[in-house]
Structure formats: C-alpha cells, structure tokens
Amino acid sequence: MSGPQTLAEHTGVLRTKMGAAFPGNRAVFRGHDLHRELKDLDWLSLCAFGIFGRHVPREQIQLMSSAWVYSSYPDARLWNNRVAALAGTTRSTPNLAISAAQAISEATIFGRGNEFRALDFFLKTQQALDAGASLPDYLENFLRSGGRLAGYGRPISTSDERMPLTLGLAEKLGLTNGPYLKLAFDIDRYFESTGRPLRMNLSSLLSAFAADFGWTTREFNMQLFCAFLAGMYPCYLEAADKPPGATFPTPCVDVVYEGVPSRDWPVR
C-alpha cells in the first residue's frame, strides 16, 4: 500500500524493531540492552550484530577485518585516498575529508560495488550449475552476452599480494572448505587455462567467503564499509601538513585542452 494513507499511519510515531535511546536510563540495540547485554562486544562484533541481527562467528569477523588491514594502503594516488589528500590540502576538516573518501569507495570497478557484484555472480553461477549448466559454457555465455566479471582481473598487476595472507588466515580459522570458495578457484583455473588475464583477486576471494557464510549482498556490502579506512588517515594528515595546494598541483601548461579554441571578442 502506498499514498497518503500509508504516510498518515506513520505520522508522529517511529515504529522500529532496531532500537531506541532512553537518555538517563538505557539504550536498546536490536532488542538488547546495549550497556548491559552487549557491553562486552568489541566494536566490529557490534557492527556485525547491527547488520545481521545475530552474533556473527568470531572467525568470520576476524577474516573480514584482516582484509581491511591488508587493503588499507596509505597511498594518496589511489582514487579514494586522493580525495582525502586533496581535502587535506584545502584544509577541510578530517571528518569531511574521510567521509568524502569513503563515499567514493563504492566505485564499481575498485570499490564496494565490485564485491557486491562478485557475490551476486557467485550465487547466480552456482544456481546455474545446480540446474545442470557446465562451468565453461556458463562463463563463456556470460562474457559473450556482455557480462562484466567482478573479482577477476586487476589493474597494473595480475597478481594480488593480499591473497596468500587471507588464505593463510582462513586456513588457520578453518574457513576454507566452503563450496563457493571452491567455485571461485574453479573459475580462476578455467580462465588460466584459456590464457585470459582474468586472475582471481581479493574481491572475488572475500565474496566467495561471504557466500559460504550465507551473507546477502547487502549484508556483505555493509560489512566491508571500512575496508580502506585506515589508509585514508595518513593521506589526509600528510597533505594537511604540507603548504596549502601542495598536494597534486597541476600547472596550466600540463593541461591538455581539446575543446573550443580561444576566440577574439569584438569590442563594442
């Protein structure tokens, strides 16, 4: 139902199953007392509880949070870190700078949009295989139809230095026996056999783990929100400590302009 009646039913009241604050008394977080029942959770576990509505196994949180460490490169040349650095060079506040950098971290190719699509791809691929399709035929049809394969291939380098670290930790945590992880490597081996430069990267690896954990695409997307965050702070601070405008300045002579040529304006 939509329209004025629906809006009228929600006017003047907030109906929620998520929680509420009662200043001076208590705070309710997904039906639990935040300061009594949930006080011993660490911050990552609380975030996960807020996303999933249940306590996520510590091993799963540890694996995903380790990927945040492995992906927090303090390199201001990276697309989202550049925003933090440029904000620093203009003397923006830290919160505005980091928030802007976080906002563009959802880039389709490099950021959160990539894992979102990769997880969706794994789920749909497994459905097709369960229905009787062969993996080579499915992949080739997917690519021929214009599908964009998230999680395979990487700019600059075909290898991903984060993969061995993540796999090593997953092995220690007992998380490497899932069917989607096997599927991810089956796809990687197929592309290697065909000579395509579409090698598996960390996005596809984490997406496969998320599928094995039973996470939805939205849950996975929200859980990885902070993956680049730690690398943004140094980029902002370094730029803010330099003279204003000294981070990535571009002289006018370095700008290649291909638009309308200069014109003489008649004097009247």
Image: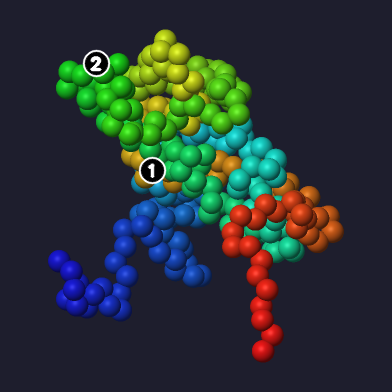
- Image location of residue 221, percent across then percent down: 43, 43
Image quarter of the N terminus: bottom left
Report if residue 49 is visible in the image. no
Residue 75: which quarter of the image?
Answer: top right
Pinpoint residue 214: horizontal percent, then vertical percent: 33, 32
> Residue reaching furthest bottom?
268
Q: Amino acid at mark 1?
A: Glu
- Which residue corresponds to the image point at 49% horizontal and 20% vertical from the top-left? 197
Residue 207 in percent (x, y) is at: 42, 31
Of residues 28 and 226, the one nearer the viewer is 226
Q: Residues within 10 Å of mark 2 (few under 14, many from 20)?
A: few
Q: Secondary structure at mark 1?
A: helix
**Sequence order check, earlier mark of 1 and 2:** 2
Dot 2: element: loop
Residue 53 in sight from this viewpoint: yes
In the image, 211 versus 110, the foreground residue is 110
Disc number at residue 134? 2
Which residue does the numbered mark 1 point to in the structure image?
219
Q: Quadrant of the C terminus?
A: bottom right
Closest to the camera, between mark 1 and mark 2, is 2
